[in-house]
Image (spheres, coloured by chain):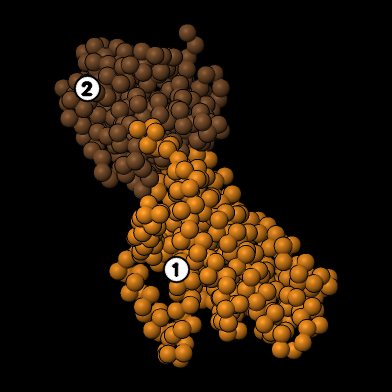
Chain colours: A orange, B brown
Amino acid sequence: MSKLVFAKPSKIKKVRKLLPSLAVVAIYLALPIMGLSGFWIDVLTRVNIFLLITLSLDLYSGTTLYLNLGVPFTVGASAYAIALLNRYLGIPVEYAILPSAAISAVLSFAIFIPSLRVRGAYFSILSLLLPIILAGLVTSQPFSLYLGGEGGISYPPLFFSYARTLPARERLFFLSASYFYISAAVAIVAYVICYKVAYSDFGFMMRSIGQDELLAEASGIDTFRVKLVGFTASSFLSAVAGALYAAMRPPVTADVFIPANTLVPSLTAVILGGMGTVVGPAIANHLTLITYEVLWGVLGRWRIILYMCLLIVLVLLRPQGFVFYLYLRLKRAVSTKISRLFEGA
Amino acid sequence: MGKLLICDNVTKRFGGLVAVNRVSVEVSRGELLGLIGPNGSGKTTLVNLISGVLAPDEGRVLFEGRDITKLKPHERVALGISRIFQGMRVYPYLPVYYNVELSARSVFKDAKLARSKTIWALTTTKLLAETLELPANLTPYKIKMVELARALVTNPKLVLLDEPFAGLSPEEVSEVIEIVRKLNGNGLTFIIVEHKLRYLMKIVGRVVVLNEGRKIFDGAPSEAVNNEEVSRVYFGVV
């Protein structure tokens, strides 16, 4: 039986298993050079950035079941950090992305640390209040004088100085394509790391907290430390998302703190995808956000009402999510076909 | 032989209720101690005070001579105190293997050692055939075994069993007793909280009886049965 538990698949089998996923990623990455319109490249870039927020939510809230509603705080803090570093210190956004993400992660860590000590819904309530406070501060005097108020802070976007040297018709494609590839590369790296962490011993410790925190503590798990490390890693991901988004889409305004803009799409993806599964929320992130854009062409402004109603129905019908289970079924079917192909060869 | 555990005048209050009232208990290494008393007498609260789930309002808890009163539950597990809870308490969505291995990983930094300890604990509790099962697919007896395996995997010196026979058939109780006896024979110390006295009295060397948070008896099981106060409060003999 111990062999059954620890038996590792051979390298060939591992590669064979990864083939379908690699093919999907390769096609996805080839989309901009296959003639996809600038509008859709921009949509996919936004979807890639939202994937970071989705992964961040899934990594912490999906495993520990501590619903972190403070994601807009982290995203907004890093977005404003980019803008402020650029405006007051003259640091180009290219060099401000990582420092801004770090500043935001440290801020989140410092501010949320007391709320990590409380259990259950209290954490969510505390985390929800912070973005609202910050949005109020940004738009109120005297802070609004320095933080741009309702109009936000504007600055040259990522790679703008280089893009200006290009011919006008190449400029937009260059910016769109480079944003897409940067966001996709960061999203892929983040996905692989999140997947590894979520299914590591540390990931299972986070899951144990979600399933029975008292039992986890009494079983020897330092639950506070696990929550702290998990929360900080998750915050860093959200912070990178905020910094990337701000670097590519100036100006930064207080809208970034509104949960409907920053939190709801990713939270929906996590729930529909299957909390804590990583794969499910990642696929759901792309499915829901792309569907949302497609609906714009069909339904116009009605899309918000229809889309939200659809999500309510799906969440009510299957609160544990469904995308992950569909993915497993599809994966099994594809793997069987590939195995047959190899056996035939 | 030095005392493994000393509860020194521990008191725990919940508002106006004194759940444990200046209770002192000493446990020697290798001892098998029974902790009995009527419902609400403070048995589980005392177990919670020893395992660190609750902090006493007064008094101290010493383990191997060290004051552990302020240590958190996971720190006490690392020192060698593990427990199983009253009722069935496992991670419902983790397979048996991870239910046990997680505790091992929290104590042993070496992954290989944690794995070998897990396999040992699963073998001892006869769970090797169920390693990949979810708890929902297990019988109450097997779930008890998962809890026991989880308690054993951290290499404890003292194991606190809170009602280990509850919900089990006589045959299953006998199997639990067999495992406990074997481990105790190897030097592991147990404190067992149990209502099924006909089984408990057969295996323990000493019993402590609590009533309304106070210790009313500490001695051999045969003496407990004949003790007037114990008979009155616990067995209902007037």
Instruction: Say which amino acid is labelled 1.
Output: Ala
Q: Residue at x 40, y 25 (%)?
A: B120
Q: Residue at x 58, y 50 (%)?
A: A228
To which quarter of the image does residue A272 belong? Answer: bottom left
Q: Helix or strand or loop: what does disc 2 sit on?
A: helix
Where's the C terminus of chain B, which quadrant?
A: top left
Q: Is residue A285 above or below residue A140?
A: above
Q: Mark 2 packing: few (<14 Cα in 10 Å), some, or many (20+)?
A: some
- Give residue A334's position: percent from left, percent from top: 38, 60
Q: Which mark, by number, is residue B174? A: 2
Instruction: Say which amino acid is labelled 2.
Output: Ser
Q: Mark 1 packing: few (<14 Cα in 10 Å), some, or many (20+)?
A: many
To which quarter of the image does residue A89 belong? Answer: bottom right
- Give residue B116's position: percent from left, percent from top: 45, 28
Q: Helix or strand or loop: what does disc 1 sit on?
A: helix
Q: Is residue A121 above or below residue B61?
A: below
Which chain is disc 2 placed on? B
Residue that protrudes farthest toward the front in the picture: A345
Q: Residue at x 65, y 59 (%)?
A: A105
How far apart in space, not on screen, are marks 1 and 2 (Cα)?
A: 51 Å
Q: Residue at x 66, y 74 (%)?
A: A179
Q: Are marks 1 and 2 on the same chain?
A: no
